[in-house]
Amino acid sequence: MECSIETLYDLRETIAARLLEGAVYPWEALPKIPAFILWLGERLPEEFFEERGKGIWIARDAEVAPSACLNGPLILDRKAQVRHCAYIRGGAVVGKEAVVGNSTELKNAVLFNKVQVPHYNYVGDSILGFRAHMGAGSVTSNVRSDKALVVVKGNGFAIETGLKKVGAMLGDQVEVGCNAVLNPGTVVGRNTDIYPASMVRGVVPADSIYKGAGKITEKR
């Protein structure tokens, strides 16, 4: 199934692997993120991590700008960067060498290793796979305008999440262009590129290029 955790992610590339193990779809893990962080944080080695405030664990070699605002529960893995005026509202796992950039906001999200959300991004109730990159101004929309529960829709199927808030599930090495909007319940398969300024909804297959609604081509 193109929406499954197994299909989208390499779990060796996240400190949150245990959160996702045992689930079929990634959005199943969203309500469990804060409790998982608190559980894992208490078990992190003090040699590499320090607790900087209630429920906030920061790797000793991570870089955090003085102007950044960090709220727990939160884990910043080794060599992660949180840059000027970033706002982490809580419930976030930021992977090794990941970048949370200028004026970017995170809320209830897992960023795998080497993810980059470097410029004016909003990432809420979302899971971003290894080396996924969101261009400047691209955002995840995590609540439907009618406030109904989110349904993930693909080619010939619809999966009810049972959740009001679901952002985007980006597979490993997904590239999202500048100013793209990922609508609630968007799933993007591995190695896929999203054109700048796109409005994306539903399931986008792996190894493809999304140019617009109904305009998806295979990567060559």
Image: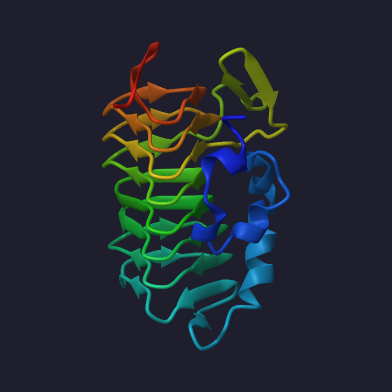
Q: Name the side, left or right, on which 4 lies relative to 76.
A: right
In the image, residue 150 sits, relative to residue 101, either above or below, namely above
Q: Quadrant of residue 215?
A: top left
- Residue in the image at 60% along x and 42% along y: 5
Q: Name the side, left or right, on which 158 lies relative to 178.
A: right
- Residue in the image at 30% along x and 63% along y: 83
Q: Colour scheme used in the picture? A: rainbow
Q: Quadrant of the C terminus?
A: top left
Residue 72, given in percent of the width and then of the height, sits at 56, 66
Of residue 93 and residue 6, the one placed in the foreground of this image is 6
Q: Is residue 125 visible?
A: no
Residue 166, given in percent of the width and then of the height, sits at 58, 36
Q: Quadrant of the N terminus?
A: top right
Q: Residue furthest bottom?
A: 47
Of residue 147 and residue 38, the one placed in the foreground of this image is 38
Q: Name the side, left or right, on which 7 lies relative to 175.
A: right
In the image, residue 173 sits, relative to residue 101, either above or below, namely above
Q: How many marks?
A: 0
In the image, residue 214 sits, relative to residue 40, either above or below, namely above
Residue 66, given in percent of the width and then of the height, sits at 31, 73
Q: Is residue 198 visible?
A: yes
- Residue in the image at 38% along x and 39% along y: 174
